[in-house]
Amino acid sequence: MTNTDAYGHVRGESVYLDDIPLIYNTLFACVFDSPVAHGILKSVDLSQALKLKGVVSILLALDIPGVNQIGGIVPDEPLLAEGHVHFQGMPIALVLAETEEIAQAAAKKIKVVIDPLEIITDPRIAFEKNELIIPPKKFKMGDSDLAFKDCVHVFSGRADVNGQEHLYIETQGAYSVPMEGGGIKIYSSTQGPTAVQRTVARVTGLPMHRIEVEVGRLGGGFGGKEDQASSWACLCALGTLLTNRPVKYSLHRMEDMRMTGKRHPYSADFKIGLNKDLNIQAYEVVFYQNAGAAADLSPAVLERTLFHCTNSYFIPHVTATAYSCRTNLPPNTAFRGFGGPQGMFVIESAITHAAEKLKISPSVIQRKNLITPGEEFPYGQKAESEAVTTWVQADSYFDFEKIISAAHDFNLKNKNKKRGVALMPICFGISFTKTLMNQARALVHVYTDGSVAVSTGAVEMGQGVNTKMQQVAAETFSISSGQVKVHSTNTLRVANTSPSAASATADLNGKAVLLACEAILNRLKIVAAEELNIPFHTDTIKIENGFVFHQNIQTKLDWKTLVNAAFVRRVNLSEHAHYATPGVHFDWTISKGHPFSYHVYGTAIIQVTLDCLRGIYEVDFVKGVHDYGKSMNTLIDQGQIEGGIVQGLGWMTMEELVYDVNGKLRSNALSSYKIPDIYSAPRTIDIQPLATTRENLAIFSSKAVGEPPLMYGIGAYFAIRDAIRAFNTNASPEYDAPFTPEKVLMALYDSEINKFHSHHSSH
Ligand code: MTE
Ligand code: HPA
Ligand code: MOS
């Protein structure tokens, strides 16, 4: 089954927030945001802005009737600045005007006086000044101090990895409409309708039952709308509350890039110890997360960095410490992988560093240390590992040795073009690491014409979850998919939802749909038994392809007649079902538990070709084997894999987020922030499925697919490094992603002298 959204998307008929037909009397909003990254807000002058014809009102923090607070995990983030500003792009005022143009023009006329304070953009400096969002988090297994003493090889170093702009095609936005009796309906481009509802309730002072949040679909979220869609919804809702008019705000691209947080940059120190057989015995790592000016989701992201700090490897002695450091950047937030990729980049850097010192291929160390079934992750969960399986299968499909030696031959024959190869195993835990979030609900109605309506807490953001929900209902009832319609995500139909995130949306909501359909199906079977005058038994009565079967023989009773018979008998044709992932728990007092219902594994091999005169590169291919469980929809899952890989490659190669020392975003538009296009995508992506059957925890035995493939992209960084060293054997560039062509060029012509002066120490 293809993605049901594809038809509307290619015809331009799919409705996004900005496509909602304008409602009579709508006001348009525009934020005035801080031009200074840190300071005391002395005064705001609205006089010139208010003189513009068509400006209806301008709201400040003091106009907020409820609480001026949008922090989800830590209450440290005002919606509108009050007294202080903490980052460039922090909302200070909201202009409401008759047209979008007037709102934008008025915002430009607002003047502020800000007494500047010291600006911190570097997480290590924030750490030195004890600017921590939360107390440090630590994972410990075994005794790394002791274990290092027994290691034959010990290496240490530093790894840095930059952030990433989400660049969803649809920018952030919201549209709020006054409802009878003082309520508000909000159309929002959010991954978390309930987060929006809860935050709007707090800011407006209204109870949650007065606030309806409606989400049709998103033009991409990638984590950027898990928490950060709330501001715009709150601002529009405030506008509606204070003017009793609909308020719309659809951010311009540069506003969005300037005001929203991104993937967290990290800086890390590592120490890795190996025995003579190259088994990693000990690993010590300290992470400095650049959280930005407020907590947002940073604490949870920090935790996932720890959960994935050993990637797919078993290391008996691990000490991992993570600091969430407060800087004067926009609050950083969820982004596909949720901190996991950053942790994985650091262990891969450590392994590569060790291999280079030992003059062996990193793949030797990688292969030797893959986690095997029953071995323990540093957080206490035992692996049901497919790490070796995916590695071995990828090797047998694609022949690593052949690829590596062909690249070697190419390098012997070519002076100014070099090929580099890297292996990239991945391991990603599925479930929200916050156990309570692993729940979902679905509402299923069967109508008297036999058609079925499904509502869940799942938000369609391009990942194809609606198609999967439709499949669950159609397969469970054994009716055609055309008889099932998946409706918008709405807090009135499904309440208290977890955000669509953690790759678990189909897992959680799909199970809820399944439970709802099964409950209705069971009631229908009882009706079928009565109608056909046969004994009721769930196993002998089946519905297949729209007909009732008894003991595998088709009866005359069809789906629609059965549904009608049930209705006549006053049988309930609707069900609201609840699902909570079984078996997941975690105890933060000891940092041990079983946080994930399962892990997704895979192994990829990545090859790049480097132009050593220019420092530019092409990714020739990404090939590998990925653990899908039993894929529910291979087309959609392949799409997720290809998109994830290209997004991961972009993060590791060309996407360069630049804030200057004043905390001003310099890469603030598509002209200065380059994401991969079709020319920079790999020539070939060939990811073969590994069908695993050991688990039945996810819907229809599938495994989550949304985030894990992004991490194959990390391999591109190390493939580029490999190619550089084929050209310049002395090159030992710092581990500092992304590997932009500028950095590549510097590394190609790096000399021992340059290296000596480098500030990164290693031995
Ligand atoms: N794919 C598309 N097309 N658009 C998106 O915004 N978000 C990613 C991933 N794939 C995203 C996407 C992220 S960050 C997550 S967590 C998952 O999809 C969320 O959806 P799922 O839980 O249904 O996999
Ligand atoms: N993943 C993604 N989003 C989240 C998580 C997580 O583990 N926890 C809270 N939000
Ligand atoms: Mo995805 S970062 O969990 O929205």
Image (cartoon, grey):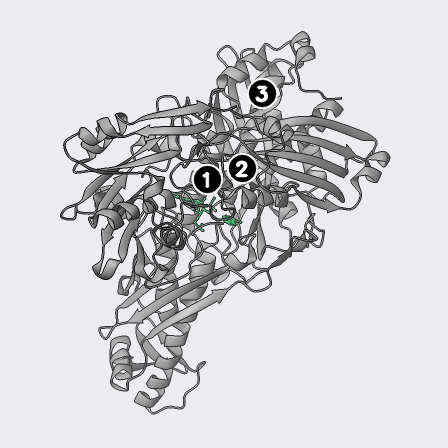
Which of disc 3 and disc 1 is earlier in sequence?
1
Pinpoint residue 103: horizontal percent, then vertical percent.
Answer: 22, 33
Q: Tell me the CA gap for discs 1 and 2.
A: 8 Å
Q: Residues within 10 Å of mark 2 (few under 14, many from 20)?
A: many
CB under 8 Å between callouts 1 and 2?
A: yes
Which quadrant, please, contains the C terminus? top right
Pinpoint residue 163: horizontal percent, then vertical percent.
Answer: 50, 31
Q: Residues within 10 Å of mark 1 (few under 14, many from 20)?
A: many
Which of disc 2 and disc 3 is earlier in sequence?
2
Residue placed furthest toward the front: 42
Residue at 41%, 25% in the rendered image:
114
Q: Tell me the CA gap for discs 3 and 2.
A: 18 Å
Q: Residues within 10 Å of mark 3 (few under 14, many from 20)?
A: many
- What's the amino acid at mark 2? Tyr
Residue identified by numbered label 1: 644
Q: 98 or 196: which is nearer to us?
A: 98
Q: Is mark 1 within 8 Å of ligand 1?
A: yes
- What's the amino acid at mark 3? Ala
- Marking on residue 723: 3
Q: 450 or 298: which is nearer to us?
A: 298
Residue identified by numbered label 2: 712
Label 3 residue SS: helix
